């Protein structure tokens, strides 16, 4: 338990993880990272994912959807390609980008791990690892 607290503290103290996005977006990314660490993900894996999300969100105007997808996949994030394409079509605010990207990543992760049925995930009834 102490390891989680120190890892989460380091996550919030490292300003370089979210240096390219605004404060509201940084909060979304850091909260997602905190949840991942509490779920037992390795700290370095979470940090790498946050950095990748930070870069893609900050550079979304100059990246193609396929390039963003490749960068996120390289960071170990199972992101839905259709969601990325939808983000480019809609062009929402930066914070909404973060919310959707971390949401689709978590949903894809649950599908690939086979944790719970779709209705369990929908109602948040799935078993915790």
Image (tube, rainbow, N blue to C red):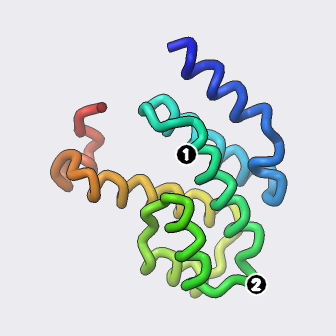
Q: Please report the residue visible at 58 percent of the width from the left and 36 percent of the height from the top.
A: 43
x 76%, y 51%: residue: 18
For mark 1, give the secondary structure: helix
Q: Position of residue 89 (x, y in %)?
A: 57, 87
Q: Residue at x 21, y 52 (%)?
A: 114
Q: Quadrant of the C terminus?
A: top left
Residue 62 is tagged as 2
Instruction: Please say if the residues under marks 1 and 2 sit with CB atoms less than 8 Å apart.
Output: no
Residue 30: image location, x then y, percent: 65, 42
Residue wearing tag 1: 45
User: From the viewer's perspective, is residue 19 above or below residue 82?
Assistant: above
Judging depth in this view, the residue of 26 and 56 nearest the camera is 56
- For marks 1 and 2, give the one nearer the viewer: 1
- Image location of residue 28, percent across then percent down: 64, 48
In the image, taking residue 94 as reference, residue 39 lies left or right, namely: left
Question: Mark 1 packing: few (<14 Cα in 10 Å), some, or many (20+)?
Answer: some
Q: Residue 69, relative to residue 79: is it above or below?
A: below
- The percent position of residue 9, horizontal first and vertical second, equals 70, 25
Task: Return the disc, 1 or 2, that comes first in the chain's sequence.
Answer: 1
Dot 2 lies on which element? loop
Please report the residue visible at 42 percent of the width from the left and 53 percent of the height from the top: 106
Seen from the viewer's position, the closer of residues 31 and 38 is 38
Left or right relative to 42: residue 60: right
């Amino acid at each position: 338990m102490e390891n989680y607290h120190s890892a989460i503290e380091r996550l919030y103290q490292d300003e370089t993880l979210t240096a390219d996005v605004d404060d509201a977006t940084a909060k979304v990314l850091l909260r997602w990272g905190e949840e991942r660490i509490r779920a037992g993900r390795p700290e370095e894996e979470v940090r790498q994912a946050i950095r990748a999300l930070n870069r893609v969100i900050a550079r979304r105007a100059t990246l193609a959807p396929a390039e963003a997808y490749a960068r996120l996949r390289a960071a170990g994030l199972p992101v839905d390609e259709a969601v990325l394409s939808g983000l480019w079509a809609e062009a929402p605010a930066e914070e909404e980008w973060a919310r959707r990207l971390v949401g689709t990543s978590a949903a894809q992760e649950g599908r690939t791990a086979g944790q719970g049925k779709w209705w369990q995930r929908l109602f948040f009834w799935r078993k915790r690892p």
